[in-house]
Image (cartoon, grey):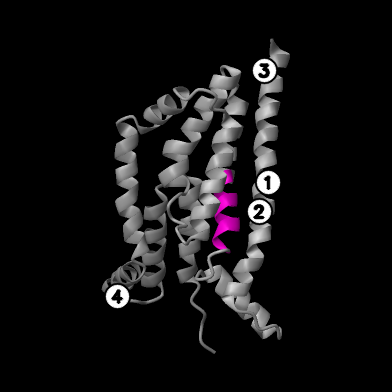
Amino acid sequence: MDEVNYWPLAGIAIVVVGFALKFNPLLVVVGAAIATGVLAGLDLVAVVEALGKAFNDNRYISVTWIILPVIGLLERYGLQQRARGLIEGIRGATFSKLLIFYLGFRQVTAALGMKDIGGHPQAVRPLVAPMAEAAAEAAHGDLREGDREEVKAMSAATDNVGLFFGEDIFFAIASILLIQGVFEAAGYPLTPLELSVWAIPTAICAFFIHGWRISALDRRIGAGRAARR
């Protein structure tokens, strides 16, 4: 009976230790992958070649590395401050109105197939969250740290809800094709267009439910501010 080689499992330990020590995630994952391949008996060149092939096959990763430095450079030169100044200059702008507008915008664009037009790194962090904070401060004054974090969290949640319930209206998307396959395997053949049409009522309900959650948070922050006076 051949002896089992457990050394390749060391890659798991490298990931756990690296994340626990808060090392750079990219370096940790790449290091774990290389260690796993080498300990499994593969040639180092072959391991690096496999990583390079996977990187090249998944070209959207390259797009991410192009976008992130651009966003970082914009933030360095005051993108968030500009976003805050813009919303502060709009009379009557509130935290709830801003996020409900963004929710609708995110759902509509996702329904048209433009699901990458928003997102946490490229839209929420540099634009939506600072604008939401500024709108909340304009309406309620200085925010407590807990309220500020809730505004940021709600900004991120709004992006998630808008994308999740909007993208299924676009029939040429992987989630619709997956649902179609599951239904077809169960004996219910449906076209992607039929599934997309039935996603519309769900998206409308999601819009009103999450819009109510946004308004409720806005009212709660205002009530807490009034109670502290």
User: What's the CA distance linking mark 2 and mark 3?
Assistant: 32 Å
User: What's the CA distance linking mark 1 and mark 4?
Assistant: 53 Å
User: What's the CA distance linking mark 1 and mark 3?
Assistant: 26 Å
Residues at circles 1 and 4 in contact by the CB criterion of under 8 Å? no
Residues at circles 2 and 1 in contact by the CB criterion of under 8 Å? yes
User: What's the CA distance linking mark 2 and mark 1?
Assistant: 6 Å
The residue that label 4 is drawn on is 46
Q: Amino acid at mark 2?
A: Ile
Relative height, residue 205 to residue 194 (above, below): above
Secondary structure of the residue carrying tag 1 is: helix
Residue 210: x and y in percent read 66, 45
Residue closest to the eye, 225 or 189: 189
Residues at circles 2 and 3 in contact by the CB criterion of under 8 Å? no
The residue at the point 61 percent across, 77 percent down is: 180
The residue at the point 58 percent across, 75 percent down is: 192
Image mark for residue 208: 1
The residue that label 3 is drawn on is 225
Residues at circles 4 and 3 in contact by the CB criterion of under 8 Å? no
The mark that comes first in sequence, 1 or 4, is 4
Residue closest to the eye, 220 or 98: 98
The mark that comes first in sequence, 2 or 3, is 2
Q: Amino acid at mark 1?
A: Phe
Q: Residues within 10 Å of mark 1 (few under 14, many from 20)?
A: some
Residue 25: x and y in percent read 42, 51
Q: Amino acid at mark 3?
A: Arg
Secondary structure of the residue carrying tag 4 is: helix
The residue that label 2 is drawn on is 204
Residues rendered magenta in the picture = 158-168
Decide if residue 182 is on the left or right side of residue 156: right
User: What's the CA distance linking mark 4 and mark 3?
Assistant: 61 Å
